[in-house]
Image: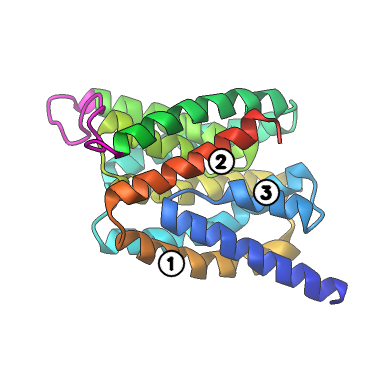
């Protein structure tokens, strides 16, 4: 296998992994794409973050159309989170260039492990039984929007800083705090990821961190597999989907907490 063929093959495989993760579990897929970009495609950490965000855009867009066709997107919550994420992602991108992220990754990893445990235990009960308040409860609209906005800001900062779409923050917040079911939370997450990734990719492109020769192969594969993953998610029981997401969080949290 010559160098160009190898580059294209691993780029397509990276896109397939990213898209499947995005569509099936509502996350951007950067948690699998970034290690593949640095390990197989010889990108620096900053280049991997930027290129991952660029390829994340078509994956999220194609996947969210499938969720929307099943009425699994709450556009008011998505719009509020997106506003917060746009504010946060630019800050996260600039912060990425100034500070080492290793200690932040470890602290965030331990937080994710705690969230994963709570989410998994809840999935064997009533699923959203620990919700603080419902996103559809008319008596609490201000609190709902405030939490959605704060969650969007946090997700945006993490997207820019760590090259992830922010779904690992947004989905647990929507399930455990807002009371959304897993399918709806994933649909909202993908809508926000599409916006966050677009802004983050543009910021990283300005900083020279997007490798277009990889992104043009990763993006189409991510879009196709994102659509397929979203279709599969729609056919799964919400508690099973929540357990799968909890397992993903255990993997992500363990990896981050160990500093890898």
Say whether residue 79 is left or right of residue 6.
Answer: left
Q: How crowded is the residue under tag 2: few (<14 C-alpha within 10 Å), some, or many (20+)? A: some
* Placement of 23 over or under 103, stated as above or below: below
Q: Residue at x 60, y 46 (%)?
A: 31
Q: How crowded is the residue under tag 3: few (<14 C-alpha within 10 Å), some, or many (20+)? A: many
* Nearest to viewer (mark 3 / mark 2): 2
Q: Magenta stretch mostly in which secondary structure?
A: loop
Report if residue 132 lies within the magenta region.
Answer: yes
Q: Name the N-terminal-most of marks 3 and 2.
A: 3
Q: Position of residue 53 (x, y in %)?
A: 60, 50
Q: Name the N-terminal-most of marks 1 and 3.
A: 3
Q: Residue furthest left?
A: 139
CA gap between label 1 and label 3 equals 21 Å
Q: On the image, numbered disc 1 is attached to which residue?
A: 227
CA gap between label 1 and label 2 equals 23 Å
> What residue span does the magenta drawing correspond to?
124-142
Helix, strand or loop at label 3? It is helix
Say whether residue 37 is left or right of residue 192.
Answer: right
Say whether residue 171 is left or right of residue 222.
Answer: left
* Placement of 153 over or under 64, stated as above or below: above
Q: Residue at x 39, y 39 (%)?
A: 171
Q: On the image, numbered disc 2 is attached to which residue?
A: 251
Q: On the image, numbered disc 3 is attached to which residue?
A: 34
């Amino acid at each position: 296998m010559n160098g160009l063929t190898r580059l294209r093959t691993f780029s397509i495989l990276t896109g397939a992994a990213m898209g499947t993760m995005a569509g099936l579990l509502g996350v951007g897929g950067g948690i699998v794409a970034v290690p593949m970009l640095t390990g197989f495609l010889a990108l620096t950490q900053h280049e991997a973050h930027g290129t991952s965000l660029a390829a994340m855009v078509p994956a999220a867009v194609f996947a969210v159309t499938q969720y929307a066709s099943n009425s699994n997107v709450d556009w008011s919550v998505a719009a509020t989170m997106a506003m917060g994420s746009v504010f946060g992602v630019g800050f996260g991108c600039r912060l990425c260039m100034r500070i080492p992220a290793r200690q932040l990754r470890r602290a965030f990893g331990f937080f994710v492990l705690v969230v994963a445990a709570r989410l998994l235990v809840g999935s064997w009960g009533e699923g959203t039984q620990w919700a603080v308040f419902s996103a559809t409860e008319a008596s609490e609209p201000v609190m709902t929007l405030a939490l959605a906005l704060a969650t969007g800001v946090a997700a945006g900062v993490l997207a820019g800083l760590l090259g992830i779409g922010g779904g690992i923050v947004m989905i647990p917040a929507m399930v455990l705090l807002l009371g959304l079911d897993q399918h709806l939370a994933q649909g909202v997450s993908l809508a926000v990821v599409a916006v966050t990734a677009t802004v983050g990719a543009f910021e990283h492109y300005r900083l020279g961190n997007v490798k277009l020769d990889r992104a043009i192969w990763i993006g189409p594969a991510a879009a196709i597999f994102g659509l397929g993953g979203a279709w599969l998610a729609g056919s799964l029981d919400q508690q099973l989907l929540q357990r799968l997401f909890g397992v993903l969080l255990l993997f992500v949290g363990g990896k981050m907490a160990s500093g890898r």
